[in-house]
Amino acid sequence: MPRKKTKSKTTKKKTTKRKPARKKTTKKKTPAKKKTKRKTTTKKKKKTAKKTAATKKMKTAGDIRVNKKAKTPSLLRGMKDLLPKDEEYWLKMRHEAESISNVYGYGKIETPIMEEASLFVRSIGRGTDVVDKEMYIFEDRDKTKIALRPEATASVMRSYISHGMQTLPQPVKVWYLGPMFRHDRPQAGRFRQFHQFGCESIGGHDPVIDAELIIIAYNFLKDLGINTTVHVNSIGTLDDRQNYIIELVGYLRSKRGYLCDDCKRRINKNPLRVLDCKQEQCQPVIEEAPQIIDWLSDKPKDFFMKVLEYLDELEVPYVLQSTLVRGLDYYTDTVFEFYEEDEEQKSQNALGGGGRYNGLSEQIGGQETPGCGFALGLERIVSVMKKKENKEENEEKKEVSNPIYFAQLGELARRGALKMIEELRKQGYAVKHNLAKHSLKSQLELANKFGVKYCFILGQKEIQDGTLIVRDMDSGIQEIIDQSQMMKKVADIFDKHGKNI
Ligand code: HAM
């Protein structure tokens, strides 16, 4: 660059001295300038061309310029919009979660969606899929490593420690419902943002606590119309597990050739995780593996037997699942999972799971504190609820919640309908309507679509007469009532066919 500069200066000198060369020199004289000029012009031209192209693409709507060709950003892979059509299931679950938690004396806790990543690395453990492959981790502006919570148990324990809850009467019993994040491979029943309802009982080591937590989850699902079988196992204390792991590693090494690549790596990294593997080729090896229950010392064994006795007492159907170890490292003693009854073989997706985590508090820097809990996957539960409802039931439900459609014809009637619908709403009656529709035909079509029992029709004539047409949608028979009778008519219809809001 500096060379070029010198060159152009020399040229400048030469040109000012020699007249004939002036014309040429004018060109040569300011090559830099000219270049710049040319550049600017080209730039300008380009810019203008771009602008024109962009303007062509854009359509002006008032003051707002709308780029018609702009692509709508797509929904992220593995994420899901929860739409109004599914709201009834979510409302039901939220309501049930709150009421069952209250009944069993659990108070609500809400922890943040983001935590220091180390909380999960230390509790869930390196070598687990959740930490190694699925955590959403990023650096905050202050360089802190942050994770979107993949689960809530570690957060609840962090909260228990940071708020000094060990000074409260023990156990401290809390419940939560909210979104979790795992960069799982999206497939049926696996999302990257999903919701869990969970209960944690911290500060108590008694088999009755484990049994109570199992019965809460079991009853929650039952109240939603889902019968489940509980798979249970005990993985004992950390010491029991160390002895078992030595035995397991020996066995797995002898079967290395039959295992998937992930499991080959797991033998040294985190051998218990081999028992969670869902790959078909690993199943025969897992089935033949030494059983952890045979390695339990007396205390954990007795503890587990008590849990099972309580479950027998409560008549909870369970299956002893010797290979069940769960995919998170913080578990000790009892572990359990919930499967839709009769679907366990077909489904690899548990509706929920949980267990005891007596070492978790110390793992994250707290005092020795026992704990036990469960979490249920709400997306999976919605899908079972939907599957269970056949079409007929769906139709019936539509009628039950929407027995009336309010149609109107003409500007005056629209205003009248707006007021009447508002009066009904104040009295607790939600009627279907679409005031933006002008033709009666399209409104009746909508009424049919909603499967309502009656359509109320208000036109110019009815406004003048102070009346209202009530059309029975099944028979097509219409009756004319006085507007003053409307509230009573609505109340009668709702008593018979619907429910208030
Ligand atoms: P988890 O087994 O990892 O346990 O998750 C519990 C439930 O969350 C699963 O059974 C499943 O229904 C649902 N779930 C997990 N991952 C996904 C996903 N990617 N998409 C949809 N649903 C999913 C825990 O999270 C422990 N914190 C449970 C616990 C509480 N243990 C003690 N206390």
Image (tube, rainbow, N blue to C red):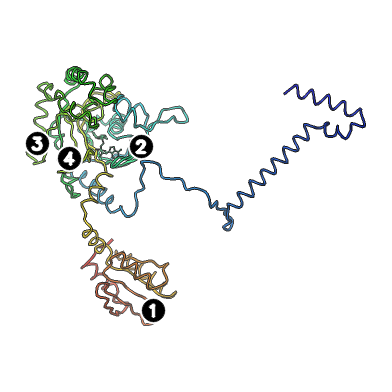
Image disc number at residue 344? 4
Q: How many numbered discs?
A: 4
- The quadrant the N terminus occupies is top right
Image disc number at residue 335? none
Between marks 3 and 2, how big is the CA–CA gap?
35 Å
Q: Residue at x 28, y 31 (%)?
A: 157
Q: Which residue is mark 3?
A: 310
Q: Residue 166 at what x, y percent from top left?
A: 24, 29
Sooner in the amino-acid sequence: mark 1 or mark 3:
3
Sooner in the amino-acid sequence: mark 1 or mark 2:
2
Residue 433 is left or right of residue 226, and the answer is: right
Image disc number at residue 112? 2
Q: Amino acid at mark 1?
A: Ile
Q: Quadrant of ligand 1?
A: top left
| Pointers 3 and 2 in contact (C-beta within 8 Å) | no
Mark 2 residue crowding within 10 angstroms, few (<14) / some (14–19) / many (20+): few
